[in-house]
Image (cartoon, coloured by chain):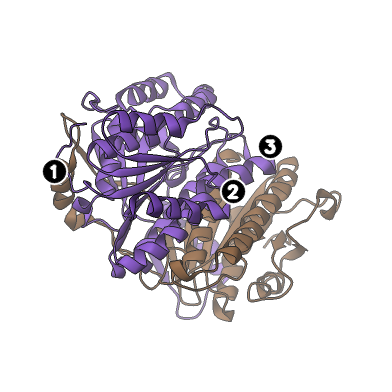
Chain colours: A purple, B brown
Amino acid sequence: MTLSPSTLAGKVAIVTGGGGGIGRAVCLHMARLGARILVNDLGVSVAGDQSSAKAADVVVDAIRAAGGEAVANTLSVTEKASGRAMVEQALDSFGRLDIVINNAGIIRMGAYDEMPEADWQGVLRTNLYGAVHLSHAAAQVFVKQGSGAFVHMSSAGGLIGSTRQTNYGAAKLGIVGLSQTLARDLGPLGIRSNCIVPSSTSRMTELTDNARKHLMTPEALENLRRARAASVPEHMAPVIAFLASPAAAALNGQIIGARGGELYLYGHPSPVRGLSSRSGWSHQWFEENLAAAWTPFLTPLEVITDVFTWAPVPGAAPSDS
Amino acid sequence: MSHKLRIVVGAAPSGPWSALADRLEAAGAEILRLGPDAQPSDLPAGWFPDGLVATPVEHQRARFDRIDLDRWEADADEELNARFRLGQLVARRMLEGNGGSIVHVVPAQGLPGAPQQGEAAILGYAAAGLSRGIALDLRDKVRANTLALEPDAGSLEAAAALILLLCGPKGRGISGQIAAIDAAELHLFAQSRPLRVAHRDGGWDEPSLAAQVARWSAYLPGLAAGGEARQ
């Protein structure tokens, strides 16, 4: 394995959902840069309910065949005990832990008024609870050693919004709350936490794109097709690896997007229009004044393709898949 | 108000948020209190709500590494599942009628955030994500907004006045928004959108990413430390 100069050399990372898609690309890329990886993957379908081949083992074998170091873990992130078990396995295997990448996620789509509660809970437990479990366990180690980095997979579906995904949107905005919490509470102790908002081709995006085809204009659909074609998981991996590395020391509590060869800095939810009252608020005052005061500042009811109306220029050809 | 608004309030019968239903009632609304396990039969036949107000549970306050994970999970289950379940139950009834408005109340310490308020932040942001999704999915008939406040008397009274507006005919243009209110101030939030964009022809690597981040240093949003974000 060729080791490029990187501040990741010698670091130990846990990557959840590392058996496929972006997770797999991140594992392979970080290992190529010299990091040692615990590859966690339960081996399930994109809906999280079908057992498949031992995806984690396949990635571990690929890393080892290239001269890197990795171990497999097949626990479900939805179980509270799995977070601590993964941390202990990383410590037992490599003697340290430096990085957690909360990547594991599933999708179960459906309109809100028709969504089964099992689909709500299933997505929340994998995409949000799983990240909380592992982050809490890793935080114990990071606080003791006074260092560590978290990278959390959020989504434009949560930040901007998307249809037929109330469960996914809630989980992915909850992830932002988790990342901000870690950054705020543990930043003064030398620990960083950031979110990545990827746009990539994967089993997940194929599913969501197909489900929304009928809602898009032909132009929007073509832009989305070109955007997906320009963004493969291997384009996301260097950005995620960077956020986890000491080279990103200036970033804490940030939300970074990646799409093809494009890189985005996202804003945080924050006050944009303030009103004050000396005599207290009343229903009558709101009826007479609020529309005029707020309307120019309202966030449009838009979805991802309303914000990203252009296809990105393709990124560089993947070199380390 | 031209008619008495019908508002379902999902809140524990006691605790700091329980007074919100009383404030709404005192402000002139007809209130139906429902627990987290409400069934469709708990909505009276022919009773079409104008609004639903979903409130948070009481959150633990601790630095993230010191939170009780068992309690976090129990609180998350109770709050998030109740928001989903009650919202769906009431939204279905709204869809049968003339539509309505859902207001997800979250603690101001969680959104945008404050130190040692991780539970409130994680659940508050998740509630905002659910609210935005409802606003998009049901946009033709059901509105959904997130309102951050603390459960003190002045903030609850202010929130009640705003909730009546959001659930009434003059609130029809407001959906998918996040706001924070107290007795003296009302803030409408900007939501996360790209502030800066960069492109690199050859793809990104560690040195080029570090250089780009350095160019963005003046634009990096700061973290909310005391309940306010700066940008």
Q: Amino acid at mark 2?
A: Arg
Per the image, label 2 sits on a secondary structure element best described as strand
Instruction: Please determine if labels 3 and 1 lie on a single subunit.
Output: no
Q: In the image shown, does A149 or A137 lie closer to the viewer?
A: A137
User: The C terminus of chain A is located in which quarter?
Assistant: top left
Task: Return the x and y of residue A227 as percentages of the image width and height.
Answer: 33, 26
Reading the image, the residue beneath label 2 is B143
Give me the residue at 16% from left, 37% from top. A4
- Circles 3 and 1: CB distance less than 8 Å? no
Give me the residue at 24% from left, 48% from top. A10
Taking the image as shown, residue A2 lies to the left or right of residue A164, namely: left
Reading the image, the residue beneath label 1 is B207
Q: Amino acid at mark 3?
A: Glu
Reading the image, the residue beneath label 3 is A114
**Cα distance in 3D space between marks 2 and 3:** 17 Å
Q: In the image shown, does A313 or A7 lie closer to the viewer?
A: A7
Task: Report whether residue B124 is seen.
Answer: yes
Task: Return the x and y of residue A79 as percentages of the image width and height.
Answer: 58, 50
Q: Is the residue marked by circle 3 packed among few (<14), some (14-19), or many (20+) residues within 10 Å?
A: few
With respect to residue A83, does B20 lie above or below? Answer: below
Give me the residue at 55% from left, 30% from top. A45
Q: Is the residue marked by circle 1 packed among few (<14), some (14-19), or many (20+) residues within 10 Å?
A: few
Task: Report whether residue B191 is seen.
Answer: no
The subunit carrying tag 3 is A
